[in-house]
Amino acid sequence: MSLVYDSLARWSVAWSPTQVPALGLHAGSPTMRTSQKDFNDAVSQVKLLKEDPGNEVKLKLYALYKQATEGPCNVPKPGMLDFINKTKWDAWNALGSLSKEAARQKYVDLVSSLSTSSKSPSPETPAADRKPPEGNSLVVTSEDGITTIRLNRPTKKNALTTQMYHDIIAALQAASKDESTITVLTGSGDYYCSGNDLTNFTHLSAGGLEEMARSGEVLLRDFVDCLIDFPKPLVAVVNGPAVGISVTILGLFDVVYATDRATFHTPFSHLGQSPEGCSSYTFPKIMGSSKAAEMLLFGKKLTAQEACARGLVTEVFPDGTFQKEVWARLKAYSKLPPNALRISKQIIRKQEKEKLHAVNAEESSVLRERWLSDECMNAIASFLSRKAKL
Ligand SMILES: CCCCC/C=C/CC(=O)SCCNC(=O)CCNC(=O)[C@H](O)C(C)(C)COP(=O)(O)OP(=O)(O)OC[C@H]1O[C@@H](n2cnc3c(N)ncnc32)[C@H](O)[C@@H]1OP(=O)(O)O
C-alpha cells in the first residue's frame, strides 16, 4: 500500500516496547491515576490489535507515546519534504505542555477503547453495516455494444490509485479494439470519483520524491494521451460528485451525462497543484476564460446544473431516474453504425489533437514541479493527517 500507511503501521510496531497487556481497567475512569505498568501494558496491547486502527489514530498514539515518555516535543521540526516525519512531529508538537502523566492516561484510555471496538463483529451483524471489500478497483464489462469502465472503490469515493491509472489505460486500449460502439466511464457508489488518490504521493521508491514526481508525470501524460487518442465515442456517466482529475478530463469526453446530485470541483490551488487533463486549454474553450479561471484557479465547485450551463456537462438527469434514462439512451445510440461514429469522432478530434498533446505534455511537466513544492506537500500532509478536507 502507500508509504504513509505502511510507515504509520511500522511506527506502531517501532514504538511498542515489549511489555505485558492488561487493558480495560481504565475505560470510563479518566480520573484514576495511570501507573507505569498500566501504560506499559497498553503499549504492548497496541501490537495485539486485530484491526488496523487507521492513520489518524496511529498518529494520536504516536504523539501520546512520545509525550508520555519524553515530555513536550523537543526535537527540531523536520523539513517540508520529510513529509512523514513532519506529520509525526506536528502531532506530537500539538500536545503542547500536556504532562507526562496525563499523556499516559490518554494513551491508556485510547488503547482501551480500541481494544473494545476491534472485537470481532457478532454473527448477527447485518451485512449492510460492514464495509464492502476493496476487491477489484476497476470493473470492465461489455454489453449491448457498450464497454463500461467502472471505478469501483466506493469506500474511498473512487479515488484513483496509481494502479487504477494503469488499468484504465489498459481498459481503454482494449475498448478501442473491441466490438463495442461506445465506451463509458462511470463510478460505483455515491461518488463518481474523488480525483487522484492522495496517498499516491507517498509511494516513494529508492529514488525518493524526485523519482515519484518523475514517474507521476509520465503516468499522467500517458493516461491523458490515451484519452486524447481514444478513437470511439467516449461518454462519462457522472453518478455523483466529481473532484480533480475526474473533472478536468471531462473536456476530452464526447458526451457527459450527470445526475443532479453531481458536483464538479477542481481544488488545485488549495492543494498547491495546477490543472491537468488538458483543462488549461479545454475549459476556457468550453466555458470562456473567466468561468474557467473561477474553477481552475479559485476552485469554485459547480452544481450539475451550473456545469451544464457552462457546457462541461451535456445533460443533467434527476437522480431517481438517472441510471434508467441514461442507459436507455446509450443503448439506443450504441445501435448507430459504429464505423460512421468512429470516423466522425476522429474528424472532430483531428483538428486539435496535436495541440492537446502539447498541452498535456506541458501540464504534466508543470505538475511534476508542483508535486515537489512545499505548498503541495503541506496540503497532502494535511489531508493525510485528517486536518483538511475539501
Ligand atoms: C499519475 C498521477 C496523476 C495525478 C493527477 C492529479 C490530479 C489532481 C487531483 O485529482 S486533485 C483532487 C484530489 N482529491 C482530493 O483532494 C479529495 C480529497 N478528499 C476529500 O476531500 C473528501 O474525502 C471528499 C470531499 C472527497 C469526501 O468527503 P466525505 O466526508 O464524504 O468522505 P471521507 O472524507 O470520509 O472519505 C471516505 C474515504 O475515502 C478516502 N478518500 C476520499 N478521497 C480520497 C482521495 N482523493 N485520496 C485518498 N483517499 C481519499 C478518505 O480518506 C476516506 O478514507 P477512510 O475511510 O479510510 O478515512
Image (cartoon, rainbow, N blue to C red):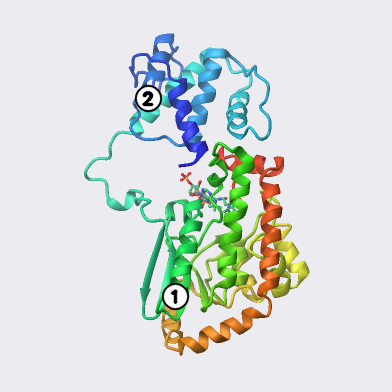
**Local crowd size for mark 2, using a 10 Å CA cut-off: few (<14), some (14–19), many (≥20):** some
Which of the two discs, 1 and 2, sits closer to the camera?
Answer: 1
- Seen from the viewer's position, the closer of residues 219 and 190 is 219
- Seen from the viewer's position, the closer of residues 357 and 127 is 357
Quadrant of the drawing holding the N terminus: top left
x and y, in percent, of residue 368 in the image: 67, 50
Circle 2 sits on which residue?
A: 47
Mark 2, ligand 1, within 8 Å: the answer is no
Residue sitting at 43 percent across and 86 percent down? 332
Which image quadrant for residue 121? top left
Residue sitting at 78 percent across and 67 percent down? 290
Mark 1, ligand 1, within 8 Å: the answer is no
Residue sitting at 67 percent across and 54 percent down? 268
x and y, in percent, of residue 13 in the image: 43, 24
- Seen from the viewer's position, the closer of residues 57 and 375 is 375
The kind of residue tagged 2 is Lys
- Seen from the viewer's position, the closer of residues 339 and 33 is 339
x and y, in percent, of residue 307 in the image: 63, 71
Residue sitting at 66 percent across and 56 percent down? 364
Q: Is residue 1 above or below residue 37?
A: below
View extreme (left): residue: 123
Dot 2 lies on which element? helix
Answer yes or no: is residue 244 visible. Answer: no
View extreme (right): residue: 290
Circle 1 sits on which residue?
A: 177
